[in-house]
Image: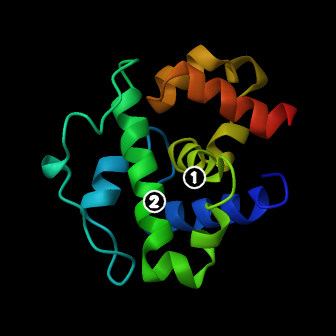
Amino acid sequence: MTNTRPQLEAIANEVMEAFEVYAPPVPIELMLQKPPTNMWQEVDVTQLSGSFLSIKDRFSPRMSLARLLARHIASSDWGRKRGIFSLVQEGDNLHAFARMLAMPEDMLSGLTSSNRSPSYISSHFEVPTDDATQRILELFEG
């Protein structure tokens, strides 16, 4: 993951710019439903089965949607042109890319060090604490 992380972070930032997302929480569902022209096909999230969504944590469904968004971006023509599809095939890269989309590096880096706690990030970005912890490790301790 370490050698692909900068590429995936840059692509996640490009996605945030395309959607004009500058503050958390990232509108994952809206990004799936209303992509900018020529990015990817919209997804009807009302058609998702309940078994698709994880409900371990109150924010788990958002991370399930973030993983769907990551997969959708990677398999779209837009994503394939950027090489995302091959990047997310390795190890845990798909989950890592989903975390990058839900908790963009620029937004996390803008937090004060005292706000870089799993509980704060979980509530601020509306993500499960486990994913917030993993993202902190990826960005600040990895």
Q: Position of residue 11 (x, y in %)?
A: 62, 66
Q: Position of residue 74 (x, y in %)?
A: 50, 68
> What is the quadrant of residue 111 in the picture?
top right
User: As shown in the figure, which amino acid type bears the numbered disc 2?
Assistant: Arg
> What numbered label is drawn on residue 71?
2
Is residue 4 or residue 100 the one in the foreground? Answer: 4
For the point 78% across and 39% down, the residue is 139
For the point 25% across and 34% down, the residue is 51
Reading the image, the residue beneath label 1 is: 94
Question: Where 119 sits versus 82, above or below?
Answer: above
- Report the residue that reaches farthest toward the left: 46
For the point 31% across and 58% down, the residue is 32
Badge 1 vs badge 2, beta-carbon distance below 8 Å: yes
- Residue 120 in view: yes
For residue 103, side relative to residue 112 (left or right):
left
Question: Where 18 sits versus 45, above or below?
Answer: below
For residue 11, side relative to residue 54 (left or right):
right
User: As shown in the figure, which amino acid type bears the numbered disc 1?
Assistant: Leu
For the point 76% across and 56% down, the residue is 5
Is residue 135 or residue 109 the one in the foreground? Answer: 135
> What is the quadrant of residue 103 in the picture?
top right
